Image (tube, helix red, strand yellow):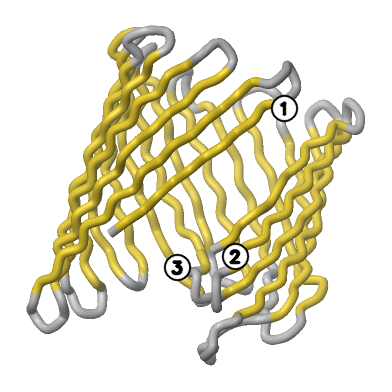
Amino acid sequence: VEQFGGNLKLPVSQRINIRAKADHSKEDAGLETTAMEVNADFALTEQIGLSAGVRRDERTDHSSVVVATQEEGERTDAVVQVEYDPGNRWRSYVFGQTTVEATGDREKNWRGGAGGEMLLTERLSAEGEVSHGELGPAARVGTNFQKSDSTNVYLNYALDNERGANGLHTRTGNLIGGANSRLSDSASVYMENRYQHSKPETGLTRAVGMTLTPTERWSVGANLELGTLKDRRTSAETERTAAAVSVGYHFDKASVSTGIEFRYDDIERSDGSNDDRTSWLFKNALRVQLTDDWRLLAKFNHAMG
């Protein structure tokens, strides 16, 4: 898979901001996608903001055998959003999206919705968004509670209309509840429960992790995830165990980090037999502050299983 892209944020004036983004992905003898979008933000008043944008994407499948349900062609969407922020304890927005042009067998992608954020108390905040369109309903709701100066508790749910690598629609829901706490200036911990429901599988996983910064230059992290996923069609279960460790070092104008992730899946087949899969991921990153305006970022990841 080859991927490249870029994004730009340009403040034209105190009231106008331009955002642009482009991404390209190409699989060897597979799906090739290109997406480009431009958005403009306008501050009409101190409380009212207007955003408008255009997005164009193209999909081409180079597989030797293209599945009948694959969508190929180009589509151009336009979106407008109006936001009201009185600057105190809440803000709200409404948006609308429509398809200007679609070629091939691309589906139209009109959508409308509303959302907002509210500070319920000095420590409790809530946010949410609901929308509906050609690809079905979508929703997002979340709460955040600042239990103390060092501990934060949260609960979030999102229902998405995602699209898999094969071009098919996938309705996925994720419920995440957890907490993170700063034990000291050099140590913090987190714990999460993650419940996922979707067409292929559903299940609950639990994750815990810790980050240590024993000195100003060194940082160390570790986490563990355990859970069971069940195939909604066959009821076959997958027992998952995953763990990761990472270490980083910070120079005056540069930082490097490396990490190892391990995952073991004990998979129950629909015929009653069991199979196992072991995966390893090695992650490396480099960040250099070249000047006050420029940064260099580099990553090298290697996966095996």
Tell me which residue sits at (90%, 33%) in the image. 12
- Residue picked out by circle 2: 132
Residue at mark 3: 171
Q: Residue 114: x, y in percent?
A: 64, 51
Q: Secondary structure at mark 2?
A: strand
- Asked whether disc 1 touches disc 3, contact meaning CB atoms under 8 Å apart, the reply is no
The spot of residue 207 in percent (x, y) is 25, 40
User: Percent from the top left, x then y, of residue 295?
Assistant: 67, 27
Q: Is residue 153 above or below residue 228?
A: above
Mark whose residue sits in front, 1 or 3: 3
Type of residue at label 2?
A: His
Q: Which residue is mark 1?
A: 86
Q: CA distance from mark 1 to mark 3?
A: 35 Å
Which residue is found at the position 41% from the left and 43% from the top? 156
For this rendering, which residue is in front, 114 or 8? Answer: 8
Characterize the local packing of mark 3: few (<14), some (14-19) or many (20 or more) Cα atoms within 10 angstroms. some
Marks 2,1: beta carbons within 8 A: no
Q: Nearer the viewer, residue 111 or 36?
A: 36
Where is residue 1 shown, x and y percent of the image?
Answer: 54, 63
Name which quarter of the figure residue 276 lies in.
bottom left
